[in-house]
Image: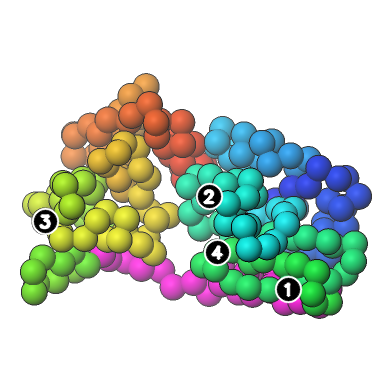
Amino acid sequence: MLKIAICDKEPLHLCYAAELVGRELSAQRAQIEGFLSPQALLRAVSAGTYTPDIAILNGSVGRDAVFSREMHIARCLNQLVPRCRILFLAGYLDGSWEVCERERRYFLSKKQREGQARDALRQAVRMLENRPRRTSIAAKTGGKTTVIPLEEVLYVERCGRKCRVVTAKGDYLASQHPEELLLGVEDTFVRCHQGYWVNLARITAQSNNEFHLDNGSSIPMSRTYRRQARARFFAYFKG
């Protein structure tokens, strides 16, 4: 079942968006949760008690939208839940929307009819249901590319402008930045430090400042990433 979060400070607008989602998705396919502020949504996600697949946020769309508060909220949400698709909605009582996909985000504004909103929602759902599941990463060094199964990776460590992939069978040096190497498999890893990305499936326990892995090693959690890393950890094992 898909978890869909709807966030708007106006209860009337929130109810309207919930009705729209309800008309498109049956109760068997979607569980709708309403939030009256983005802070309330982020608190629930940060606490590890809620992990949305799609988040519908109120927002204004324009040339400066990338610098807006709504975009900041979206970035924070995607750091916590990388797979979450985000829909920005503006002027919903006008019944008019515009769709523009940017990775996981859809901008819906006042230039099209309500049917466009339904199309965007369907597209987001299709992407979630049909997204390919990557089972490996490709570490490039010079002219050589090594394909490493995700199940073997313990963690990835930043090494200057490169990174080191640590597995149970040995280490691999990659010329990519960690963010580039892990693009598309963000759900599998959690960043817990400026220099470490840990495979969630290899974590056996967590303490105040560390993740403990199944090979006996421990990876530190820095103050900057600790809260989000813990939230991702608990959300992952909660399912």
Q: Is residue 225 above or below residue 79?
A: above
Q: Quadrant of the N terminus?
A: bottom right
The residue that disc 4 covers is 104
25 horizontally vs 231: left or right: right
The amino acid sitting under disc 1 is Glu
The residue that disc 1 covers is 98
Mark with earlier residue (2, 4): 2
Camera-near label (2 vs 4) is: 2
The residue that disc 2 covers is 75
At mark 2, the secondary structure is: helix
- List x then y, in percent, for residue 158: 21, 46
Camera-near label (1 vs 4) is: 1
At mark 1, the secondary structure is: loop
Camera-near label (2 vs 3) is: 2
Residue 130 magenta-highlighted: yes
Residue at 15% from the left image edge and 61% from the top image edge = 175
Contact between marks 3 and 4 (CB within 8 A): the answer is no
Q: Which residues are magenta?
A: 114-137
